[in-house]
Image (tube, rainbow, N blue to C red):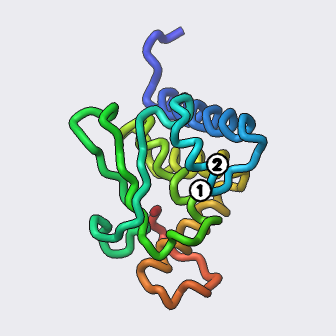
Amino acid sequence: MNPHPTAEEAQQSLRDHVVTKAMDARLRRGGLIDRVEMMRLLEDRAVVRYPLGVRFDAEPLLPGEFACLESLGEHPRDGFCLFIHPMFENVDDLIPLLVAYYIPAINYGEVASHVEAELFGATLLGIDVEEYYTILCSVADTVSDPSNASSSTPGCGGHHP
């Protein structure tokens, strides 16, 4: 047995861990992750390793971004702020989907890619990864062009949020 895992084995181990964490969090909350429960979940250090606040403010967002994560200090223990576009502040059904996407970046740092973010979010919310991705793309498209808000056409142009 090789004492040093390959990059592929390490990546798969991370993905397995992400899914396990999300599934455990979902089960501990009875399978319901609504806006209120998501805000409670952010305080659970077994799920979200470091402090995370949510703020509805578009100022730090780049064009087309629905949210961005900013560190509050030199070390992750100093916490993070997730800036979410204010157009979503009153869209309670979307908040868990938007917030969940960023939890792997908080927990695992730069080793977490969009793949881990999508796996975590979909698993936590109990939906298929492709469905989760499609929803996030629609949200990103809405920010890019608010007239898309009623469109059922998924976007992202092949890019991940």
| Nearer to the camera, 120 or 36 | 36
Circles 1 and 2: CB atoms closer than 8 Å: yes
Furthest toward the bottom, the residue is: 147
- The residue depicted at 72 percent of the width and 40 percent of the height is 29
Measured Cα–Cα span from mark 1 to mark 2: 8 Å
Disc 1 vs disc 2: which is toward the camera?
2
Give the numbered dot on residue 96.
1
Give the numbered dot on residue 37.
2
Tell whether 157 sits left or right of 126: left
Tell whether 32 sits left or right of 141: right
Answer few, some or many: residues within 10 Å of disc 2's Cα (few below 14, many 20 plus, some between 14 and 19). few
In the picture, which quadrant includes the N terminus?
top right
- The residue depicted at 57 percent of the width and 36 percent of the height is 18
Residue 41 placed where, x, y %?
Answer: 58, 42
Q: Earlier in the sequence, mark 1 or mark 2?
A: 2
In the rendered image, the vertical position of residue 99 relative to residue 116, given as above or below: below
- The residue depicted at 49 percent of the width and 44 percent of the height is 103
- The residue depicted at 63 percent of the width and 39 percent of the height is 22
In the rendered image, the vertical position of residue 48 relative to residue 125, given as above or below: above
| Nearer to the camera, 64 or 154 | 64
Q: What element carries label 1?
A: helix
Residue 144 placed where, x, y %?
Answer: 41, 80
